[in-house]
Amino acid sequence: MTETFADELRQATWGDHEAAEHTAYLEALMSGKVSRAGYAEMVAQHYFAYVALEAAGRALADDPVAGPFVRTELERVPALERDLETLYGPAWREEITPSKPTLTYVARINQVADWPGGFIAHHYTRYLGDLSGGQVIRKVAERTYEFDDEGGVGFYRFPAVPDLKAFKVEYRDQLNALDLDDVQRKRIVRETLLAYQLNTEVLVEIGKRLPEYLVA
Ligand code: HEM
């Protein structure tokens, strides 16, 4: 049986997934050892990336290739804004700054925003991750920071996606339905690897402040 594109994408990037998952920052977060301020810093960096990603998505909404991936039920910016207000207070916009790796990541998202395959690479890396490992992060964050319903982990909640598993199956079907030749497939795989690298660099940068963020 020939390998589907979704399988190819997962297999080609899983090693890089491991690298992202096992950054010192995420390991500490998953052990409940990161302070609320340390968690807030990741939410802030997410915010800048998703503003870029979702603006790119809106611009591609009518594109025959990328358009079907742009789904309002995935939109994260409104939830991120609420989470940031919970974490930083009403003046959150003045409290947060994109790190250098986040600026690089945003620049890359913008650079490929007119290439549907490149957009899909970045879309896949973030949203399929949020629907997968993001759900594990949500459980740990809920336990660690005891957020109420006002926000904090809204980024990881997808109230408009009632069945995450079914949604992911559909998403992979959509990837497999893309009409791609070998060269196009390879380009998207490469862009996805870059998306992982850029995400990892964002996490490594946050991790530099771990001594400040670690709680006993
Ligand atoms: C604590 C951190 C993380 C954990 C525990 C985790 C865990 C997982 C697990 C268990 C899956 C498989 C789900 C399934 O087969 O349905 C998955 C998939 C995925 N994760 Fe993560 N992950 C983490 C961090 C990340 C990060 C930082 C990214 C990207 C920036 C990411 C991107 C993805 C993607 C794109 C998939 C889908 C792979 C595919 O099936 O094609 N994950 N993750």
Image (cartoon, rainbow, N blue to C red):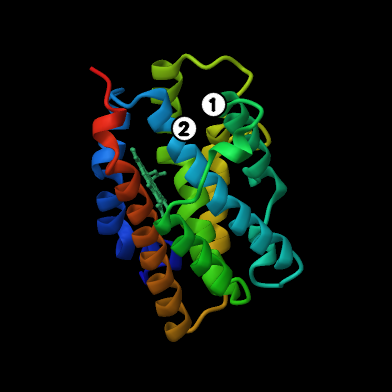
Q: Position of residue 34 (x, y in %)?
A: 32, 27
Q: In this view of the protein, which residue sits in the foreground, 155 or 72?
A: 155
Label pair 2/1, CB-CB below 8 angstroms: yes
State left or right for residue 206 relative to residue 45: left
Picture disc at residue 87: 1
Where residue 12 sits, quadrant-wise, is bottom left
91 vs 15, left or right, is: right
Q: Determine which residue is flagged by label 2.
A: 40
Res 35 quadrant in image: top left
Residue at 58% across, 68% down: 110
Where, by quadrant of the figure, is residue 23 drawn? Answer: top left
Q: Residue at x 43, y 52 (%)?
A: 99
Where does residue 67 sit, x and y in percent of width and height? Answer: 69, 65
Residue 10 at x, y = what percent? 36, 59
Disc 1 crowd rating (10 Å Cα; few below 14, some 14-19, many 20+) is: many
Q: Residue at x 27, y 35 (%)?
A: 210
Q: Is residue 152 left or right of residue 197?
A: right
User: Along the line of sight, which residue is nearer the eye, 197 or 3?
Assistant: 197
Q: Is residue 178 visible?
A: no
Residue type, label 1: Leu
Work out whether 104 lies above or below 205. Answer: below
Q: Secondary structure at mark 1?
A: helix
**Residue, x 45% and y 29% (percent of image)?**
138
